[in-house]
Every structure is written in C-alpha cells, then in structure tokens.
Image: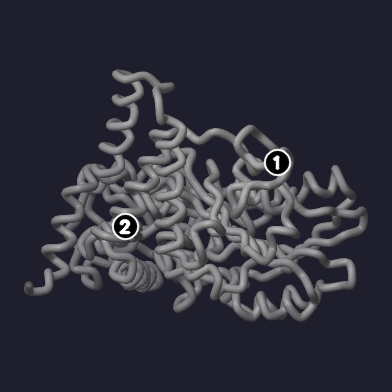
C-alpha cells in the first residue's frame, strides 16, 4: 500500500476532529480538541448507563477491564509497565498523590523552579504548612539555560525531592530531564515530574527520563475528556510513595490494608466510566490513527514555523527560546494586554489563550497542534503582526483575514531576557 501523503493524512484526520474546522485551534495547552471517536465512546457508555442501568451484573468487572486498557495504552505510549500507572482525574491529582505520599519531617526540603504552574506550587505550599517542609526555588529565567546547574546550587543534606515540569507552561521550553535525574540519583533524591504539557506534545519515554513519579494530563495534548489523567510511579519506588488516601477496592482482597498490587493502590476514587472510555479512545486515536512519531515531528516543525514568523515582527516580545521548544509559543504584543490579544485573535478566528504566570508577566500563548495546517500557522502570525502594527504577509504568504495589516512604526522586536 502506498504511503499516505501528509496533505491527505491531515485532511482525513482534521475531518475527525470537528472543532479544528470551526476555529484555528491553538489551545491544546489548556484543552485539546475532541476527536469523534472520543465523543462517541463517551456517548456510548452514557447511553449504556441510561438504557441498561449503572449497576448491572458484571459492571465492576467491565470497569476494571476498561481501566486496565487505559493503563496498557499509557504504557504503550510512554514506556514502562501498565501496572506502574494509576488513573487519576488530573495532573494536579497525580502531583498530590506523589507529594503527599512521602513521609515528611519538619525541615525537609524540596527544590523546584521559578517557572512552574501554580498546581505544583500549591501542594508544595500545603506541605510547608502541614509538615514544615521548605521549598527552594531555582531561578531559571525563561528556561533556556543550565537548569540542572541551577538546581544543583540548592541541594543540601535535607533535600528530599526535586519537582519540576517536563515542558514549562509559560515559555514552552522542553526540559532535559536526564542530567536532573542523574543529579537526583547522585544525592539520593526523588524526582517528581509534572507532565501536563509534555504528554501528547513531545516524545516521552518515562523510564528513560529517570523520573520516580511522572504525571499525565488527559484533556490537553492527548485530546481526552475533562477529569482524566494518570500518574506513573516506578515500581521500585512503590515503598517510597505510600497511598495518601484509601478506599474500597484499593486494598488486596486477600487481606485488609494490604496495598493493591501495582500503582492501582494510588487511585483515589471512582472514575467516571464514560470519561475512562473516552480517555482510552483518545489514546487509541493518537496512537493508531494519528501516529505519535508523526504528531511529535509535525508539532515541532509547525511550532518552529510560528516562532520564526513572530521573531520577524516588530513590536513582538518573544518568551520562547528558539530551538528549545515544541509547539508552545509564548509572546507578547507590545502595548496590548495579553487578555485583549487572545480576545482579538478569537474574533479573527484563532483560539489561543493568555497565561498569568506570577511573578513573571502575563503572556499570550499559542499551542500548535498536529491538527494545524501551515496555512493556519501563517495566518495566525499575520493576524498577530496586524495587532503589532506590522506586516509579515510577505514572509508567510498568508491570506489576510479581517482588517488590513499596516506597516507601522512599531517598536523593534524584542526577546525576553532570562
């Protein structure tokens, strides 16, 4: 069979993801678009519950089979064994499982970075209030420098954990985890990774990263339903991370209070069966229809294309270092609030978002997905240029949408300082 061309493939796949035909969809960093297969799986399970009842013979066994399927798909995409994955309801859920599962003492220390999402900072603050754990924050600028070196400067004999993101949410930098994992091993420190912006965005083999715990978001780049996610716990670390809550079905049926085998011991509550089925459908669609290698290559290529366009526009400040990002492109339009930038672009047919990332500035962020076309990327750049009072039409070849762009006196393009 002849290999399908990229043009035919992207047209075929986009037809299965209707939202990307309704808008220039550049917001997978918050919520990815649903494929029809995901929608259909959710509806199919909901209709089964409606028409047959939610508690019928075999229902719990069926739920277990579907949950096992999700774990198998996660292992296929991300490496490791299926029993090292616990199904969660969010990335934050997974971070809480990992951080609250350790036996903390007052004065213990955690090292994180200055570019983390509040959903990592918040459980760290809780540990401080509850156990007297100290958080050390390594300043890493926009993330393009030596992150391992910045972290190393903070390690003391009281350091227990290094916790950070694999892809930084407010600059898009893909963090090289291997030297950080080596640093953690050298000092007998655990490495906990927030994978909210990485899984489905860039190639990830969790065991190869060296992470002891690694969280997964279902609704972002994977395009799964809300309320889905996972956490990977290395099997040789099960004794280090204790379950922080218990429920029926979480223990081994051969004896009370014996943890369930594998990472299932960390699952904190009943998951919505329709959401679990939708998550499985999203993983299957990504692996079997889209193709993970093709998706990662395309995302990186299109992200670089957008970044190059924006770097050529006067009046734009770039917050994403060239060569260190995948599809997350962060920028500001001089003199325009990022909230207004996102709103104005939506009016022109492009969905991005603004990111408030204190103590840094609020920024505009475009999440370039595999479903985007080169023409959409170019047209988005052209509209951003129009907001900046510049023009990149000659560079992108994009067709103009909305009001004409103008060549103004805008300020010179700037790159945010580290």
Quadrant, the C terminus: bottom right
Q: Residue at x 81, y 64 (%)?
A: 160
Query: Residue 258 or 344: which is nearer the viewer?
Result: 258
Based on the displayed image, in which of its 4 quarters is residue 115 positioned? bottom right
Q: Is residue 315 above or below residue 102?
A: below
Q: Which residue is at the front of the view, 272 or 215?
A: 272
Choose top left, top right, bottom left or bottom right for residue 293: bottom left
Circle 1: element type:
loop
Using residue 116 as the reference point, say whether residue 320 is left or right of it. Answer: left
User: What numbered label is drawn on residue 255?
Assistant: 1
Q: In the picture provided, is 402 more to the left or to the right than 355?
A: left
**Residue 95 image position (x, y, % from top left):** 64, 51
Percent position of residue 299, x then y: 34, 66
What count of labels does the image hold? Answer: 2
> Residue 377: x and y, percent?
28, 62
Q: Is residue 48 visible?
A: yes
Crowdedness of circle 2 by 10 Å Cα count: few (<14), some, many (20+)?
some
Please say if the residues under marks 1 and 2 sit with CB atoms less than 8 Å apart. Answer: no
**Mark 1 closeness class: few <14, some 14–19, many ≥20 residues within 10 Å:** few
For the N terminus, give its image quadrant: bottom left
* Residue 104: image tag: none
**Can residue 406 be seen here?**
no
Residue 127 point in image, percent of width and height: 80, 48
Residue, disc 2: 286
Q: CA distance from mark 1 to mark 2?
A: 39 Å
Outermost residue on the front side: it is: 254
Q: Residue at x 25, y 44 (%)?
A: 37
Q: Going from the N terminus, do you reach mark 1 or mark 2 first?
A: 1
Residue at the image point whose x is 62% and y is 68% from the top: 211
Q: Residue furthest left?
A: 1
């Amino acid at each position: 069979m002849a290999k399908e061309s990229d043009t035919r493939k992207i047209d075929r796949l986009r037809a299965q993801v209707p939202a990307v035909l309704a808008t220039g969809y550049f917001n997978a960093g918050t919520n990815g678009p649903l494929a029809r297969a995901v929608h259909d799986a959710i509806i199919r399970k909901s209709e089964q519950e409606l028409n047959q009842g939610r508690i019928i013979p075999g229902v719990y066994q069926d739920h277990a089979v579907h949950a096992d399927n999700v774990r198998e798909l996660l292992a296929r995409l991300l490496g490791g064994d299926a029993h090292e994955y616990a199904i969660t309801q969010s990335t934050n859920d997974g971070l809480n499982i990992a951080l609250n599962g350790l036996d903390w003492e007052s004065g213990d220390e955690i090292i994180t970075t200055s570019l983390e999402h509040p959903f990592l900072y918040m459980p760290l603050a809780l540990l401080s209030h509850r156990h007297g754990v100290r958080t050390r924050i390594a300043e890493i600028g926009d993330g393009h420098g030596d992150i391992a070196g910045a972290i190393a400067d903070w390690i003391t004999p009281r350091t227990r954990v290094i916790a950070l993101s694999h892809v930084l949410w407010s600059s898009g930098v893909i963090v090289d985890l291997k030297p950080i994992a080596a640093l953690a091993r050298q000092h007998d420190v655990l490495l906990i990774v927030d994978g909210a912006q990485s899984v489905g965005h860039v190639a990830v083999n969790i065991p190869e990263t060296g992470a002891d715990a690694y969280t997964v978001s279902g609704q972002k780049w994977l395009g799964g339903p809300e309320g889905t996610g996972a956490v990977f716990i290395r099997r040789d670390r099960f004794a280090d991370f204790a379950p922080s809550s218990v429920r029926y079905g979480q223990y081994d049926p051969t004896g009370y209070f014996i943890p369930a085998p594998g990472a299932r011991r960390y699952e904190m509550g009943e998951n919505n069966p329709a959401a679990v089925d939708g998550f499985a459908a999203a993983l299957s669609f990504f692996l079997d229809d889209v193709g993970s290698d093709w998706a990662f290559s395309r995302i990186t290529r299109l992200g670089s294309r957008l970044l190059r366009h924006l770097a050529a526009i006067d009046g734009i400040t770039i917050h994403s270092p060239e060569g260190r990002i995948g599809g997350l492109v962060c920028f500001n339009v001089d003199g325009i609030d990022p909230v207004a930038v996102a709103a104005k672009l939506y009016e022109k047919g492009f969905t991005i978002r603004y990111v408030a990332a204190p103590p840094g500035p609020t920024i505009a962020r475009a999440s370039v997905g595999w479903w985007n076309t080169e023409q959409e990327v170019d047209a988005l750049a052209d509209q951003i240029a129009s907001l900046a009072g510049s023009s990149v039409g000659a560079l992108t070849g994009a067709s103009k949408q909305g009001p004409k762009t103008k060549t103004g006196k805008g300020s010179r393009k700037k790159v945010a300082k580290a």
